[in-house]
Image (tube, coloured by chain):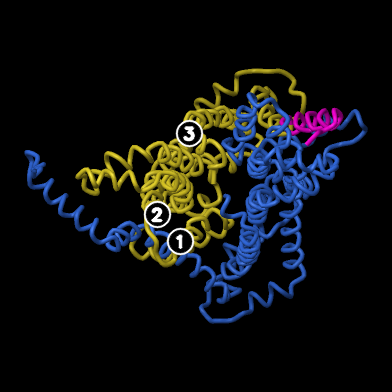
Chain colours: A yellow, B blue
Amino acid sequence: MQLSRRARVALRVAAGLGFAVIYVPLLLVLVNSLNPDRSASWPPPGLTLHWWSVAWTNSGARAALWVSVKAGLGATAVALVLGTLIAFAVARHRFFGRDALSFVVVLPIALPGIVTGIALNSAFQAVLQPLGIGLGLFTVVVGHATFCVVVVFNNVAARLRRTSGSYEDAAADLGAHTFRAFADVTFPLVRSALFAGGLLAFALSFDEIVVTTFTAGPGIETLPVWIFGNMTRPQQAPVVNVVAAVLVLLSVIPVHAAQRLSADTATGSRV
Amino acid sequence: MTVTAQPAGGRPEGALRRLAGLLHRRPRLRLTLLLAAPLLWLTVLYLGSLAALFVSAFWTTDSFTSQVVRVWSADNFHELFTTPVYRQVALRSVGVALAVTALCVVIAFPLAFYTARIAPPRRRPFLVVGILTPLWASYLVKVYAWRLILSQGGLADWLLRPLGLSGPGFGLTAAVLTLTYLWLPYMVLPVHTALERLPAALLDASADLGAGAWRTFRSVVVPLVLPSVAAGSVFTFSLSLGDYITVQIVGGKTQLIGNLVYSDIELNLPMAAALGTVPVVVIVLYLLAVRRTGALSSL
């Protein structure tokens, strides 16, 4: 398509504006963490690192971070197992309800978190309470794992679709039994997809707030729940600013890691 | 020649081999073992909880004790359809989800057109990463960023003051803007991919037949990119429809369907469940409609 010079310039400007809109809010969070003032008025009256040192010793934020990491690791572990099992079943077998299964896997992330949250909350109360098990970190892990399965499934299934079963057949012809073929042939093929899926699952869990609100027991506070609870307290504003800035900075790590993996994991694999 | 690949350990390896042989001969058994755990989790735990929740939508609440009374009635749904507030909020929520989707399309097109077809090819992968990166930044932090921007005396006010204007403050506009910002990458990425795959020959053919840039865009580019727009809209639409946190943070007094569900949970769980069916039904209908365009397979 032959675009006029004017159209090209216009598109370039529009794209520039688009990127500005994407990044200005994130930069604002970074700058605001250096704001000595408690209010968010712009421009800030000065810059200081004081609140970073205050935030470093904030016990609430630290405890919440630790809870988030534990919940994320637990949910990722469960999602890796379940997602991989479904991916193998869907990619290597034909069975009744295969399409329905792929649909059900997506549902937990497509439906509003509040619906999933209250559904799980009522179910936990009805089933676990009589057994003497209350809501706690365990229930958060169960809730998170439910919607994390889909990202592992997507990554592994996409990889399996691209690598045909003939490698495994070849391994079998050469005398390898099912488990040996899996360990020596299939697993190395899907390893990076597993890693990418696990990374996404952890990020998804680490970021989640709605399902967490309804599945966490008393005293269990993940980092997003902590931020949400302290966001509107003027007293805590500077610490929230710093925590937000840290999270913006941390988001570069998974992008970098995903980029180093294959191209299919880097684009569009989030959900 | 007989190969006796019997390792030193012998027995466990032999048992493993027998099990492997069994699994190899009986694919149904293998499938059952593969699916047992995930099916238990997804159908019993997840779908079971959802089903129980929707069944409870047909129960009622004792207005004195807030206890759930397990008597079948369609009262909640009757209330849902006849109370003007509920209808208003439901329509407003769908309107917000559609507005966010439309805004995302309008912003995504020029952006993706630049990253996919105008930017120098060497730079394109970096631009894609540039669009992807904000997806990894925390949802809550992004909403918080907009709270900072839109707060009184914040960046929006500061930018608009020279023009004699002020920012929109917290409210419906703020909620739409923030939701658009949150879900924009989900629209840009599929549109970028579709535009990138667009064969140059088609565009040349269109030009050879005398079409100008605008005509080519309307008659060639848009129809080919439309399935990807539909795929992206699944995210922008359904994620906006169920949101209540963003509205709580930047929406001022605005209420969307999620907020109503949230406010009913403590005192009237059956009503909350009935309200919760609204976004679920709308989203499932939307998914089915989009599936007809074939967009879901490209997700």
Q: Which residues are magenta?
A: A1-20
Q: Which element carries disc 2, helix, strand or loop?
A: helix
| Quadrant assignment, res B6 | top left
**Dominant secondary structure of the magenta stretch?**
helix
Residue drawn where x is 93% and y is 33% of the image: B164
State the mark number for residue A86: 2
Q: Is residue B57 above or below residue B105?
A: below
In the depicted view, which residue is nearer to us: B154 or B35? B35
- At label 1, counting other C-alpha atoms closer than 10 Å, the crowd grade (few under 14, some 14-19, many 20 or more) is some
Same chain, labels 2 and 1: yes
Q: Is residue A40 above or below residue A50?
A: below
Q: CA distance from mark 1 to mark 3?
A: 27 Å
Tell me the chain of label 1: A
Dot 2 and dot 1 residues touching (CB under 8 Å): yes
Q: CA distance from mark 2 to mark 1?
A: 9 Å
Check disc 3 and give the amino acid type: Ser
